[in-house]
Amino acid sequence: MMKQEIPSRRMVLRGALALGCSLLAPIALVGCDSKQGASSSSSAPTNPPATPAANKKMPQTEVQYQTQPKGDQRCGGCLHFIAESNTCMLVDGPISPEGWCSLWTKKT
């Protein structure tokens, strides 16, 4: 009879790690298909996103920006307002702390 060699604990753990990673890689890459959702028509989407794409701010006219508050909602109390520069993370141009727009979100 042959003596069966028992693998070390380290080898068993390495094998388990390799197997686990090989099973998770396809799951992690599911959303990476560049052709997914592509259409042959060049029409604009029917429901554009409510917030702008990364690094692109929305024009003030698109978000109904006004220089006066709407009730107790003021840009100065908005999550997106940058007080140091009187600007907004989402809206283009100078923003008054007393202004308001449709993207207003209460600062927590």
Image (cartoon, rainbow, N blue to C red):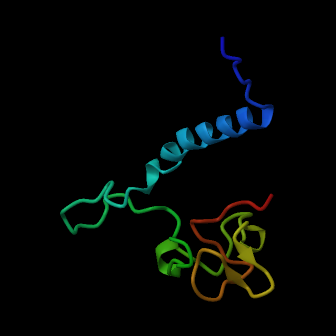
Q: Where is residue 66, by image quadrant?
A: bottom right
Q: Residue 19 appears at what percent x and percent y?
A: 59, 37
Residue 36's x, y, as percent? 33, 54
Give the camera-side residue of 53 and 63: 53
The residue drawn where x is 70% and y is 64% is 71
Pinpoint residue 37: horizontal percent, then vertical percent: 32, 55
Is residue 34 found left or right of 39 in the rendered image? right
Residue 7, x across and y down, in percent: 73, 29
The residue lying furthest to the top in this view is 1
Q: Please identify the quadrant where the C terminus is shown.
A: bottom right
Viewer-proximal residue among 94 and 99: 94
Depth check: give the residue in front, 76 or 42.
42
1 up-or-down from 106: above or below: above
Q: The N terminus lies in which quarter of the figure?
A: top right
Q: Is residue 51 left or right of residue 35?
A: right
- Residue beneath the point at 45% across and 48% down: 30
